[in-house]
Amino acid sequence: MSDQAPTPAQAAEPKRRIPVLVLLPVIIFAALAALFLFQLTMGNDPSKIPSALIGRPAPDTTLPPVEDLVQDGTQLPGFSKADMMGKVTIVNVFASWCAPCRQEHPLLEDLAKRDGFQMFGVNYKDKPENARRFLGTLGNPYNRVGSDPKGRAAIEWGVYGIPETFIVDATGTIRYKYIGPLSPKSYEEEFLPQLDKVLASPNGD
């Protein structure tokens, strides 16, 4: 039996195409996976993504205090860029719901015992009661904690994902940024040497 030729109606019927929007998430995922693989194969640590803010002034951000976060009987203040001027400042972005933040917290507690700088926390997209419970349970290493409930300050700081930790010199210039949770190894071998470098030249000289 010979093959039948398609009818005019069948010939005119358009072929079904997969919508571009359906493929878009797959394309984005493939691109990110390729980037991550490139970082690994090139021997680079994905946590060392370069920041456009390194060497530039810290954002002129004013953050209110976390409601009812008390230390030594007084409300712990929020902060602005003006509070960073004149002293080396470590800025750590954290949240109570962030498991890696809990992982690195003992290192921040150790860091707070050192001299020569101040430590500010940015409480990212968190509820005040949860932030208070988090710091009340694990300890509060910060001199000031600013509330960033909508994440706007984090965007200004160029945060990729929390936790992230910045070192700002006495002129208000960002000198170093660590992406992800500090580990004992990265703390000792990377972060502290970078901090010592800034402390040795707090004005960027």
Image: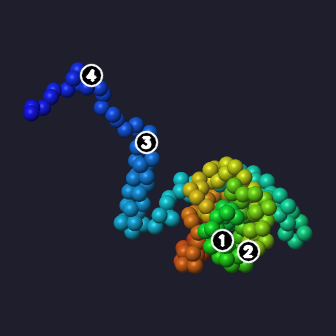
Label 1 neighbour load within 10 Å: few <14, some 14-19, many 20+: some
Q: Amino acid at mark 2?
A: Leu
Taking the image as shown, residue 182 lies to the left or right of residue 39, namely right
Rounded to the nearest whole Å, what is the CA distance between mark 3 and mark 2?
Answer: 44 Å
State which mark lies toward you, 4 or 3: 4
Name the residue that disc number 3 marks: 22
State the SS at label 1: helix
State the SS at label 3: helix
Q: What sort of colour scheme is used for the picture?
A: rainbow
Residue at (12, 32) in percent of width and height: 3
**Residue at the left extreme, as displayed:** 1
Nearer-N-terminus badge (1/2): 1
Q: Amino acid at mark 4?
A: Ala
State the SS at label 2: helix
Nearer-N-terminus badge (1/3): 3
Rounded to the nearest whole Å, what is the CA distance between mark 2 and mark 4?
Answer: 72 Å
Marking on residue 138: 2
**Residue at the top extreme, as displayed:** 8
Residue at (78, 59) in percent of width and height: 128
Nearer-N-terminus badge (4/3): 4
Q: Position of residue 21 (x, y in %)?
A: 44, 39
Rounded to the nearest whole Å, what is the CA distance between mark 1 and mark 2?
Answer: 8 Å
Q: In front: 59, or 67?
A: 67
Quadrant occupied by the N terminus? top left
State which mark lies toward you, 1 or 3: 3
Marking on residue 102: 1
Evaluate if marks 3 and 2 touch, with contact meaning CB atoms under 8 Å apart. Answer: no
Q: Position of residue 168 (x, y in %)?
A: 65, 62
Rounded to the nearest whole Å, what is the CA distance between mark 4 and mark 3?
Answer: 28 Å
Q: Is residue 192 visible?
A: yes
Name the residue that disc number 4 marks: 9
State the SS at label 4: helix
